[in-house]
Image (cartoon, grey):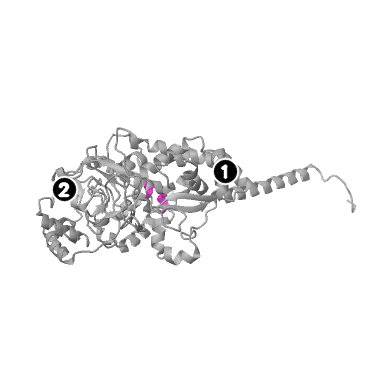
């Protein structure tokens, strides 16, 4: 063909050009989809902190990972961060009280982007999931005007997990959970491109709504069979296992139980963190708990082994008020005589399980779990490829070490006794009702304020010990001591 010819190159050339264009568009579309939905960015848990404050707020990488580190649940359970950010603003009328996520009693460190117990990681887009600290981060104030002190690995006695789940369900059932209802608020806080707005309006917001509604159906059992509400500082740990992990039929049982402290794990090896002794291995408890908040089986063991090392070294905080050293010394003798056998590390019955007939505390939590449930859970773990110590059905409730006992109020497995002074009263003299969820400490009672809500502690929860699973009886140990010995013992317990 001569130079400058305009002859037709033929049909195959045109087909090749069309195929090439389609391939380029397909590759570009695939890259775009990967970037927007699948691209995983390594998490930096202190990236939200101003550089000038990182030394103050991020002193311990292990602790930061415990509070804010991703457990890998973003794809399955992650809430898009822009949606999470605007939920309290769009649905403020559905909150239990004003205050955003603080309305659920969730601790929040000043200067942080998220409450303690929440992680943000980019998988395509930023997504928020929960961490172990959602159940294990205590908070206390020494007075109404004091700044809250947050203690990772302590029991999250102010966090109302059920109220948070109920809020998500109510929001997802509200017509404002839509592009029209949420995008204007999102645009106030986030720089969204045109494509982002379209994706959120027609894909991400509807899919997030669908996922929250599916979760609400999974948790419908919480309100079935007249079960008492969890209230702050509690959940239903073994019903969560039975109904959410194993998908067993609802058997109507009640297992409301307080979040335990998990600090000082070194003295808890080969003992049970479970209230009723179901697993004699803290690592196995960490693994099962992480699976419950969406951690993928393939990585959960490695992540929890890292947490175990942090928790072995983590110590409970000291009593923040003055101690009468002489009185505490007298109380140490009472402790050795009355309590150390069961509660001192190395005691003859420390870490062992006291039969339910002997300890006499509310048995609903104990009766929730059977050996058949344990066998099914062990089989499920193996099915998921998770190797950990097997669970069992034991005979009662486990004797726990009492380190940091002052910050572990309320007491007994179901949190039905507000203070140490009340725990040493005979059951008939313990409060029948009291208010849970306050973070202001009452050093005289050795527990948190439990009187009706006021401006210093709004939004409290009334616990009624006459309801199923809420009984405050049993644990008669020390209730018949003379008043002077009780006072000395309590003074000593402050030092543990």
Q: Horizontal placement of 112 versus 242: left or right?
A: right
How many numbered dots are placed on residues in this image?
2
Callout in the foreground (2, 1): 1
Q: In percent of the image, x 17 and y 63: which residue is there?
A: 328
Q: Where is residue 299 in the image (x, y as percent from the top left)?
A: 41, 54
Q: Name the residue under label 2.
A: 475
Does 326 appear in magenta?
no
Any part of residue 57 in sight? yes
Q: Which of 253 and 428 lies nearest the eye of the viewer? A: 428
Q: Magenta segment, principal secondary structure?
A: helix
Any part of residue 272 in sight? no
Instruction: Using a 10 Å C-alpha cutoff, classify the residue at mark 2 as few (fewer than 14 neighbours), some (14 to 19) or many (20 or more).
Output: some
Q: In percent of the image, x 49 and y 60: which residue is there?
A: 47
Instruction: Using a 10 Å C-alpha cutoff, classify the residue at mark 1 as few (fewer than 14 neighbours), some (14 to 19) or many (20 or more).
Output: few
SS assignment at label 2: loop
Q: Name the residue under label 1.
A: 184
SS assignment at label 1: helix
Q: Residue furthest top?
A: 225
Q: Earlier in the sequence, mark 2 or mark 1?
A: 1
Instruction: Tell me the quadrant of the picture where the C terminus can be found.
Output: bottom left
Does 294 appear in magenta?
yes
Q: Please give the range of residues in magenta.
A: 290-299
Q: Which of 141 and 41 lies nearest the eye of the viewer? A: 141
Quadrant hosting residue 313: bottom left
Q: Horizontal placement of 352 versus 103: left or right?
A: left
Q: In the image, is residue 55 above or below residue 339?
A: below
């Amino acid at each position: 063909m001569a130079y400058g010819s305009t002859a037709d190159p033929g049909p195959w050339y045109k087909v090749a050009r069309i195929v090439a264009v389609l391939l380029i568009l397909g590759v570009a579309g695939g890259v775009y989809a990967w970037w927007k939905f699948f691209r995983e960015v390594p998490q930096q848990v202190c990236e939200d902190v101003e550089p000038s404050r990182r030394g103050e707020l991020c002193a311990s990488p292990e602790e930061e990972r415990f509070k804010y580190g991703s457990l890998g649940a973003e794809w399955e359970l992650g809430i898009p961060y822009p949606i999470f950010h605007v939920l309290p603003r769009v649905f403020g009328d559905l909150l239990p009280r004003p205050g955003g996520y603080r309305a659920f009693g969730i601790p929040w460190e000043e200067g942080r982007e998220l409450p303690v117990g929440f992680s943000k990681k980019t998988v395509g887009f930023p997504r928020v999931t929960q961490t172990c600290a959602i159940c294990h981060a205590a908070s206390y104030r020494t007075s109404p005007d004091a700044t809250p002190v947050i203690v990772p690995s302590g029991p999250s006695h102010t966090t109302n997990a059920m109220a948070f789940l109920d809020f998500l369900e109510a929001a997802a059932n509200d017509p404002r959970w839509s592009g029209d209802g949420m995008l204007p608020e999102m645009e106030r806080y986030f720089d969204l491109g045109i494509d982002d707005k379209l994706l959120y309006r027609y894909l991400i917001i509807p899919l997030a709504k669908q996922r929250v509604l599916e979760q609400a159906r999974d948790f419908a059992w919480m309100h079935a069979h007249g079960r008492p509400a969890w209230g702050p500082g509690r959940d239903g740990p073994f019903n969560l296992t039975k109904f959410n992990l194993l998908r067993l039929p609802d058997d109507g049982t009640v297992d409301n139980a307080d979040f335990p402290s998990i600090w000082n794990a070194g003295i808890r090896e080969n003992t049970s963190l479970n209230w009723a002794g179901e697993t004699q291995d803290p690592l196995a408890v960490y693994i099962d708990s992480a699976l419950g908040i969406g951690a993928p089986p393939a990585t959960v063991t490695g992540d929890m082994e890292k947490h175990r090392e942090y928790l072995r070294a983590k110590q409970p905080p000291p009593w923040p008020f003055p101690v009468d050293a002489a009185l505490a010394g007298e109380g140490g003798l009472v402790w050795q005589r009355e309590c150390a056998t069961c509660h001192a590390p190395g005691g003859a019955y420390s870490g062992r399980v006291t039969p339910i007939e002997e300890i006499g505390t509310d048995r609903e939590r104990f009766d929730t779990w059977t050996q058949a449930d344990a066998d099914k859970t062990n089989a499920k773990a193996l099915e998921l490829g998770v190797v950990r110590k097997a669970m069992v059905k034991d005979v009662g409730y486990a004797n726990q070490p009492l380190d940091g006992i002052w910050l572990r109020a309320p007491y007994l497995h179901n949190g039905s006794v507000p203070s140490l002074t009340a725990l040493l009263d005979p059951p008939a003299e313990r409060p029948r009702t009291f208010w849970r969820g306050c973070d202001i400490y009452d050093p005289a009672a050795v527990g948190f304020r439990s009187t009706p809500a006021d401006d210093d502690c709004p939004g409290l929860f009334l616990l009624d010990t006459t309801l199923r699973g809420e009984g405050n009886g049993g644990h008669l140990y020390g209730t018949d001591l003379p008043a002077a010995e009780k006072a000395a013992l309590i003074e000593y317990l402050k030092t543990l």
